[in-house]
Image (cartoon, rainbow, N blue to C red):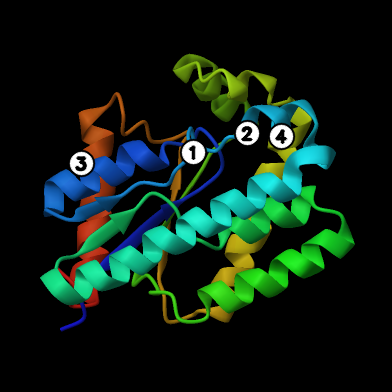
């Protein structure tokens, strides 16, 4: 039987890590968390996106590549399901928005080389919410570098995510994408919402004989 690999995706502040932790605890999955705070370029990136975008995106790409390589070895060695609070395709979402065309072309080439044999998720959980909700949640968690995120940037990011997920579904019809609206479900503060979300994820995994 295929070992489950679930990824949770969505824009900044939508609750990816919180839900991933709940999935890991509920279903006894290994949790893979993306590296964010460790990126030494993030503060500079939000101060001057054009100047620091390539360095920022390359740091994320290399670290996510290393994490997924380790997960590939882990799944082979332990035969244990994994849930990640990101999908590596997010690199292209951010890079396409922030890099100039010549830099993006170079970046995309490196991305394709590094990801051609990466583990592919069985299920993608896509979290989305209004810009108002996302900006409130970002403010509440108080990360210093996120205070510089503008509303315009978030509006563009939300639109980019919607477009990319639609493209992903067309390119990978064999991978189910479960969508949850963060304006309707607060799985962090509302246990009933959390249980509802987890049940849908469990049902999807069972339908695919992954649970």
Quote the CA–CA distance across marks 1 and 4.
Answer: 13 Å
Q: Considering only vertical position in the picture, is 125 above or below 22? A: below
Quote the CA–CA distance across marks 3 and 2.
Answer: 34 Å
Pointer 2: residues within 10 angstroms few (<14), some, or many (20+)? many
**Quadrant of the snapshot with the N terminus:** bottom left
Quote the CA–CA distance across marks 1 and 3.
Answer: 28 Å
Displayed quadrant of residue 129: top right
Nearest the eye: 110 or 193: 110
* Numbered tag placed on residue 45 in the rendering: 4
- Judging by the rendered image, the residue that carries numbered circle 2 is 42
Q: Are marks 4 and 2 in contact (CB under 8 Å)?
A: yes
Inspect this view and state whether residue 124 appears: no
Of the residues tagged 1 and 3, which is closer to the observer? 1
Secondary structure under badge 3?
Answer: helix
Pointer 1: residues within 10 angstroms few (<14), some, or many (20+)? few
- Judging by the rendered image, the residue that carries numbered circle 1 is 36
* Numbered tag placed on residue 197 in the rendering: none
Q: Are marks 2 and 1 in contact (CB under 8 Å)?
A: yes
């Amino acid at each position: 039987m295929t070992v489950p690999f679930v990824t949770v995706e969505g824009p900044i502040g939508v609750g990816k890590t919180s839900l991933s932790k709940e999935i890991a605890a509920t279903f006894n999955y290994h949790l893979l968390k993306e590296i964010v705070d460790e990126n030494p370029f993030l503060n500079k990136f939000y101060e001057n996106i054009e100047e620091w975008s390539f360095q920022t995106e390359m740091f994320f790409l290399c670290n996510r590549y290393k994490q997924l390589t380790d997960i590939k070895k882990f799944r082979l060695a332990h035969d244990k399901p994994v849930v990640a609070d990101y999908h590596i395709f997010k690199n292209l979402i951010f890079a396409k928005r922030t890099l100039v065309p010549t830099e993006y072309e170079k970046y995309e080439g490196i991305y394709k080389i590094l990801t051609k044999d990466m583990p592919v998720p069985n299920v993608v959980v896509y979290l989305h919410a209004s810009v108002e909700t996302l900006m409130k949640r970002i403010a509440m968690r108080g990360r210093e570098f996120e205070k510089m995120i503008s509303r315009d940037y978030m509006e563009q990011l939300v639109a980019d995510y919607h477009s990319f997920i639609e493209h992903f579904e067309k390119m990978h019809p064999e991978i189910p994408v479960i969508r949850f609206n963060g304006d309707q479900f607060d799985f962090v503060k509302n246990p009933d919402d959390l249980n509802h979300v987890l049940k849908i994820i469990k049902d999807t995994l069972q339908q695919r004989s992954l649970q």
